[in-house]
């Protein structure tokens, strides 16, 4: 467990706990100001509760029952008063972001699920700091930038970029909406400025909002980092291998060493074997070029394990600036 991610996660939970406490005390102040009788009733119920416990411990059944009844009556009265003044009984209790561990991060000495998720989020933050995931959503993807005029592809077929991209767009929307960890991996190929990153990050946003863990990084910053540290931070790799969806953007722009290649192979191969979905984007469009750059082992796995999409059109970034 990497120290920094852990410490950050811990302070996130601590802040949550403090925020919940502050919210709780503010609420109690508000209630007491508006209906002072409530806190008197609460005191009475607490006192009766103490006597009740003693009666139960002393096996004094009749007295315990009578105390229980008095408590119930006062409790009903308090609930009624709260209701009349626009509050509810829940307002008297401290809320917790995570009811399982009450925001302490631990259950029976073990990290709670919420803590584990926060650690992943913190690492994710760390990765996105390496390469900020571009803010993108499906709504802002503009198909009008793609021509409605048919054009001839290198293999002689005629394709209307608009129609072609509309199909890819629809596929990506459905892919994100119905995402499960059993989804197929995607390989998005095409020249720069055709919206590959935009669609990949739109998928990431939806999938993340559905509660899955998503890691995004550009190839350049991931492999830059890998070269720098020669992996002291194994946690990053283990997160890449274990997250629900991994997005490796812009393959082909990075500088590759044998070491980086072996890490890339490890990522591609392990996630393929574990059947964990990935989205790879690259502006390398030919199989031969892909093979030349990454070798047979990696390129055959990329092509074999992914649904491949060729993006077609004119550079949107240039068109936007026109
Ligand atoms: Zn928890």
Image (cartoon, grey):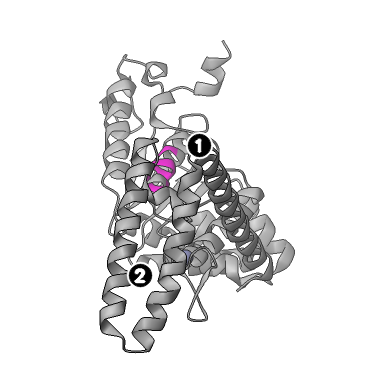
Looking at this view, is 175 or 164 the one in front?
A: 175
Residue 206 to residue 65: above or below: above
Considering every residue shown, the one lying at the far bottom of the view is 58
Looking at the rendered structure, the secondary structure element under dot 1 is helix
Rendering coords of residue 269 (x, y %): 42, 68
**Given contact means CB atoms under 8 Å apart, are the residues at marks 2 and 1 in contact?**
no
Which residues, given as a range, are shown in magenta?
202-208
Rendering coords of residue 144 (x, y %): 38, 16
Task: Please name the residue shown 31% across and 89% down the image.
Answer: 59
Tell whether position 66 is magenta: no
Rendering coords of residue 226 (x, y %): 66, 63
Query: How many numbered markers are drawn?
Result: 2
Rendering coords of residue 211 (x, y %): 39, 52
Looking at this view, is 252 or 273 the one in front?
A: 273
- Viewer-nearest of discs 2 and 1: 1
Q: Within the image, what quadrant is residue 190 found in? A: top left
Q: Name the residue under label 1.
A: 34
Q: Quadrant of the C terminus?
A: top right
Q: Work out whether mark 2 precedes mark 1 in sequence or the reverse, and give the earlier one.
A: 1
Dominant secondary structure (helix, strand or loop) of the stretch shown in magenta: helix
Mark 1, Cα crowd under 10 Å, few <14 / some 14-19 / many 20+, is few
Considering every residue shown, the one lying at the far top of the view is 322
């Amino acid at each position: 467990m990497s120290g920094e991610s852990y410490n950050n996660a811990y302070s996130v939970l601590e802040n949550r706990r403090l925020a919940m406490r502050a919210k709780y005390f503010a609420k109690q102040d508000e209630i007491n100001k508006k209906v002072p009788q409530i806190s008197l009733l609460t005191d009475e119920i607490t006192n009766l509760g103490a006597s009740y416990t003693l009666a139960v411990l002393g096996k004094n059944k009749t007295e315990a029952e009578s105390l229980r009844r008095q408590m119930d009556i006062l409790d009903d009265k308090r609930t009624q008063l709260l209701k009349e003044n626009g509050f509810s009984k829940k307002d008297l209790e401290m809320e917790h972001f995570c009811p399982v561990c009450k925001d302490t991060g631990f259950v029976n000495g073990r990290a709670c699920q919420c803590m584990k998720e926060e650690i992943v989020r913190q690492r994710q933050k760390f990765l996105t700091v390496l390469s900020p995931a571009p803010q993108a959503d499906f709504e802002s993807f503009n198909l009008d930038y793609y021509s409605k005029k048919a054009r001839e592809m290198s293999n002689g077929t005629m394709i209307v970029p608009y129609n072609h991209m509309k199909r890819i767009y629809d596929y990506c929307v459905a892919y994100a909406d119905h995402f499960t960890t059993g989804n197929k991996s995607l390989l998005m190929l095409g020249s720069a400025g055709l919206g590959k990153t935009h669609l990949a990050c739109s998928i990431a946003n939806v999938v993340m909002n559905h509660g899955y863990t998503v890691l995004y990084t550009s190839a350049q910053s991931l492999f830059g980092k890998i070269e720098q540290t020669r992996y002291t931070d194994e946690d990053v790799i283990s997160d890449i291998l274990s997250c629900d969806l991994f997005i490796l953007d812009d393959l082909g722009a990075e500088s590759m060493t044998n070491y980086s290649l072996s890490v890339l192979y490890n990522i591609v191969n392990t996630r393929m074997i574990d059947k964990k979905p990935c989205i790879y984007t690259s502006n390398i469009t030919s199989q031969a070029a892909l093979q030349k750059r990454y070798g047979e082992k990696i390129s055959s796995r990329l092509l074999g394990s992914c649904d491949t999409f060729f993006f077609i059109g004119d550079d949107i970034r240039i068109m936007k600036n026109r």
